[in-house]
Structures are given as C-alpha cells and as structure tokens.
Image (cartoon, rainbow, N blue to C red):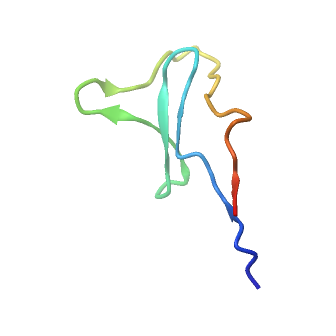
Amino acid sequence: MSSGVRLRRPTDRICERCGRREAWSDESESWRVVVDDADGPQAGSVHCIHEWDINGNFLPIEG
C-alpha cells in the first residue's frame, strides 16, 4: 500500500563561500561540478571547506 509520500533530494547546490556549483548525477550517483558553456567548470576554491546552500528551508518530504 502506498501512502503517497515522496522523498525529495536536492538536485543542485552552490557553496556559499566560494561559489562552487554542483549538480546530482543519477548516472554516476554522485555530485558533479557544473560546467557552463561560456564560463567552464564552476569549481570554486580547491581549499574551501564548502558550505552548501541546502538548509532548514529545504523540505525533503512532499505529500
């Protein structure tokens, strides 16, 4: 029996410190750096301890 509740996951994230942008890849089941056609990879700083923009406002359950 299905309850009609679905679990949502974030599909993209941006580091609030260095601007690194990543998107979830279902194919590799991991986060991948976003590549913009004009700007190239959005890798941010290699030495950053990333602080992702996913916070308490994200609601993982939809019903």
Look at the picture and state if 59 lies above or below 1. above
Q: Looking at the picture, how far across and down is residue 19, in whole percent?
A: 49, 19
Foreground residue among 57 and 36: 57
Identity of the residue furthest to the front in this view: 63
The residue positioned 59% from the left and 15% from the top of the image is 48
Identify the residue at horizontal 62%, vertical 51% (top origin). 9
Question: Of all residues shown, which one is farthest toward the left?
Answer: 38
**Hey, which residue is sitting farthest bottom in the picture?**
1
**Compared with residue 25, is residue 2 higher up or lower down, i.e. above or below?**
below
Residue lying at 47% horizontally and 30% vertically, measured from the top left: 21
The quadrant of the picture occupied by the N terminus is: bottom right
Q: Quadrant of the C terminus?
A: bottom right
**Left or right side of 30 for 63:** right
Left or right of residue 11: residue 62:
right
- Seen in the picture, residue 15 relative to 58 is either above or below; the reply is above
Q: Is residue 2 left or right of residue 51?
A: right
Which x, y percent locates residue 37?
24, 33
* Total numbered labels placed on residues in the image: 0
The answer to whether residue 8 is above or below residue 41 is: below
Query: Looking at the rendering, which quadrant does residue 29 occupy?
Result: bottom right
Report x, y in % for residue 56.
74, 35
Judge by depth and name the residue closer to the eye, 5 or 17: 5
In percent of width and height, residue 23 lies at 48, 41
